[in-house]
Image: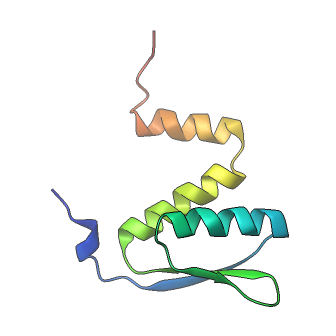
Amino acid sequence: MYEFENCAFHSEQVLQLPPSDRTDLYQRLQQLDISCYCDLQGYLHIETNNTREVILVRTVLMEFFASRDQLVTWLKQCWGNYEYR
């Protein structure tokens, strides 16, 4: 099985978000132990160190900003378009 932690990866992304979204997103990333901070200009800085963290950040961003239709499509893709009965 592939180990995400073994990937050599480092990136910092900076997002400008409304204050309420920024606070909620910051708190969720902190819960997941992903390094992030808000600066005085209102930007959220997110630091990722491996592929696992990148996937978690992407998933959290989708949770906050994707439409319901986008989330349904993504879920269907994840489950290989499995038909529920």
- Give the residue drawn at x 82%, y 89%: 41
- Residue at the top extreme? 85
- Give the residue drawn at x 75%, y 82%: 43
- Residue at the left extreme? 1
Report whether 67 appears left or right of 32: right
Residue 25: image x %, image y %?
66, 64
User: Foreground: 51 or 43?
Assistant: 43
Q: Quadrant of the N terminus?
A: bottom left
Residue 39: image x %, image y %?
74, 88
Q: Is residue 15 visible?
A: yes
Which colour scheme appears in the figure? rainbow
For residue 46, what is the image quadrant? bottom right
Would you place residue 77 above or below residue 9 in this image? Answer: above
Report whether 64 appears left or right of 55: right
Q: Quadrant of the C terminus?
A: top left
Would you place residue 54 above or below residue 41 in this image? Answer: above
- Give the residue drawn at x 72%, y 43%: 67
Give the tally of numbered discs: 0
User: Foreground: 62 or 80?
Assistant: 62
Q: Is residue 46 visible?
A: no
Report whether 17 appears left or right of 53: right
Residue 35: image x %, image y %?
51, 79
Would you place residue 26 above or below residue 68 in this image? Answer: below
- Give the residue drawn at x 52%, y 64%: 31
Report whether 57 appears left or right of 79: right
Residue 50: image x %, image y %?
36, 76
